[in-house]
């Protein structure tokens, strides 16, 4: 399958540049693209004019090394992708096309901006404005079916507009230790099949609207040790088959509605929370409780202070 773009994402220091360099030097790549392999280093604040000039130098005729670069060429190319608006409300001049992405992964490291959730996307032509002119995420990613958010140390509350991604089937928010609440609108994700909230250590409760997630078959709240209770109507999650509640140490009781989880096949927990399920075992005959031994992992602690 032809793919016009490939993106390599990883935290700083993982070797992205080294891998990309090796790819450009690969024998098969060189054989395929001949002399048309260009490796351009882009800084945090790239100068688009210099990048265009460098690429033009490299794509100029190999026979004519003295090919002259028109002075206005960089400006024209830049203007094709960006409009310089004096009032600061810049946007892409070319016609906006929906992003066909089906998977979106977000993670932060020590240098990542704390304003990631205010990410500005191009304004749509002939469409209503949203907020300060940025496009609504559900319009930018209309086909998104999976979203992974990991180690977002600045994330305190999940943006409510994420709950408009109605095609979403998998939502994973992990190791975001400052996350304290989920939006009530999460119940709008009626196509969701997996909800993973592992190691969100400051998350104290799940919204009541979670009962509307009728297609969720796997719920993971492991290592969410601030959760004290489950939603009263969690039993309405009629497709739930697997529940991971390991290390939910502050959970003292289960709502009576868990008896309605007829599809529940496996519960992963520790010895303390296993006791909470005993009164419901006669009704949940197909359910298996998987007790895991305590495995204290403190590797995430330093992330809280990064």
Image (tube, rainbow, N blue to C red):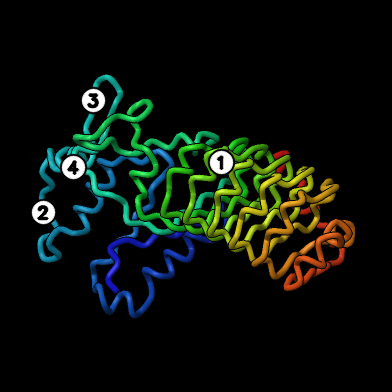
Q: Residue at x 49, y 60 (%)?
A: 16
Q: Dot 4 lies on which element?
A: loop
Distance, label 2 to label 3, CA atoms, is 33 Å
Disc 4 residue crowd, few under 14, some 14–19, many 20+, Cα 10 Å = few
Which is in the foreground here, disc 2 or disc 4? 4
- Residue 67, labelled with which disc? 2
Would you name the residue on which mark 3 appears?
85
First in sequence: mark 2 or mark 3? 2
Q: Residue at x 41, y 54 (%)?
A: 167
Q: Dot 3 lies on which element?
A: loop
On-image quarter of the C terminus: top right
Q: Quadrant of residue 24?
A: bottom left
First in sequence: mark 1 or mark 4? 4
Which is in the foreground here, disc 2 or disc 3? 3
Would you name the residue on which mark 4 appears?
94
Q: Is residue 202 left or right of 95 when viewed as pictured?
A: right
């Amino acid at each position: 399958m032809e793919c016009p773009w490939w993106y390599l994402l990883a935290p700083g220091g993982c070797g992205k540049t080294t891998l990309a360099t090796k790819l450009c030097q690969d024998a098969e790549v060189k054989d395929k693209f001949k002399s048309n392999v260009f490796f351009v280093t882009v800084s945090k604040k790239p100068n688009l004019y210099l990048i265009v000039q460098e690429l033009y130098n490299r794509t100029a005729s190999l026979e004519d090394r003295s090919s002259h670069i028109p002075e206005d060429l960089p400006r024209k190319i830049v203007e094709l992708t960006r409009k310089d608006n004096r009032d600061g409300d810049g946007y892409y001049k070319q016609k906006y096309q929906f992003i066909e992405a089906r998977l979106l992964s977000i993670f932060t490291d020590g240098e990542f901006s704390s304003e990631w959730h205010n990410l500005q996307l191009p304004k749509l032509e002939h469409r209503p404005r949203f907020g300060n002119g940025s496009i609504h995420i559900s319009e930018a990613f209309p086909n998104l079916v999976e979203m992974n958010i990991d180690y977002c140390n600045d994330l305190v509350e999940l943006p409510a507009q994420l709950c408009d991604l109605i095609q979403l089937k998998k939502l994973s928010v992990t190791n975001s230790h400052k996350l304290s609440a989920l939006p009530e609108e999460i119940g709008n994700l009626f196509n969701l099949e997996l909800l993973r909230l592992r190691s969100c250590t400051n998350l104290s409760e799940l919204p009541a609207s979670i009962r509307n997630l009728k297609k969720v078959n796997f719920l993971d709240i492991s290592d969410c040790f601030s959760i004290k209770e489950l939603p009263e109507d969690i039993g309405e999650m009629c497709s739930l088959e697997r529940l991971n509640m390991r290390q939910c140490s502050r959970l003292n009781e289960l709502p009576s509605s868990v008896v309605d989880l007829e599809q529940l096949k496996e519960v992963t927990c520790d010895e303390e929370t296993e006791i909470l399920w005993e009164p419901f075992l006669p009704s949940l005959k197909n359910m298996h409780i998987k007790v895991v031994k305590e495995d204290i992992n403190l590797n995430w602690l330093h992330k809280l202070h990064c």
